Image (cartoon, helix red, strand yellow):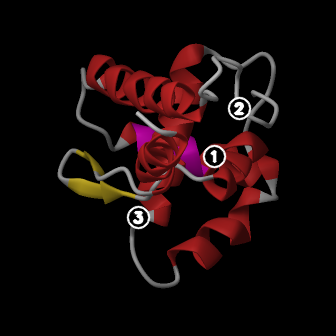
Amino acid sequence: MNDESILDERDAAFIQPAKQWQGAPLAPYTEGARLVWLQAADPADSMAFRVWSLLYVLSRLGQGPGSRQRLLEVAWQKALFREAILAWVDRQVPGSYPEAEKLVTGLLDEVERVSAEPDGKAGPGPKG
């Protein structure tokens, strides 16, 4: 496998993963999506909140034209953003957290895997 094919694989996974949550399209997990996700983050958050908040961000960004602007209108108002996430979580199918956790873990593992440099060193950028 050459360097170019490794980069193509990374870009395909990092920029264009075709993912869905309960039949609704999820936006690709990009650096921009990660930054919006981190706006809601707090060091004291549970793993469940982190999982649900990423799915919330990707589901909102995946709603088509104007979805990014609508999400950004609340994202930098942390309390409002967290309330929107919790309201969205309340509307999820009861008992669906294990499926959500599997989806998010798989997505993040895939990004981590394809972001690794050919020499085995981690790709650029902080984790968080």
Q: Main secondary structure of the magenta part?
A: helix
CA gap, disc 3 and disc 2: 26 Å
SS of the residue under disc 2: loop
Q: Nearer the viewer, residue 30 or 45?
A: 30
Identify the amino acid type marked 3: Gly
Which range of residues does the magenta coloring cover?
84-89
From the top left corner, tell me how far across and down residue 4 is, in percent.
Answer: 51, 49
Establish if 27 lies above or below 88. below
Establish if 2 lies above or below 45. below
> Residue furthest toward the bottom?
65
> Residue furthest toward the left?
23
Q: Which mark is residue 62?
A: 3
- Residue 42 image-quadrant placement: top right
Identify the amino acid type marked 2: Gly
Q: Residue, x 54% and y 51% (percent of image)?
A: 57
Q: Was residue 86 drawn as part of the magenta stretch in this picture?
A: yes
Q: Residue, x 33% and y 21% (percent of image)?
A: 102
CA gap, disc 1 and disc 3: 20 Å
The residue labelled by disc 1 is 83
Confirm or deny contact between disc 1 and disc 3 (CB under 8 A): no
Identify the amino acid type marked 1: Glu
Q: Residue, x 24% and y 27% (percent of image)?
A: 94
CA gap, disc 1 and disc 2: 33 Å
Q: Nearer the viewer, residue 34 or 40?
A: 34
From the top left corner, tell me how far across and down residue 49 is, in percent.
Answer: 57, 26
- Please state if 47 lies on the left or on the right of 96 as rendered: right
Would you call the spot at circle 2 few (<14 residues within 10 Å), some (14-19), or many (20 or more)? Answer: few
The residue labelled by disc 2 is 123
First along the sequence among labels 3 and 2:
3
From the top left corner, tell me how far across and down residue 45 is, in percent.
Answer: 70, 20
First along the sequence among labels 1 and 3:
3
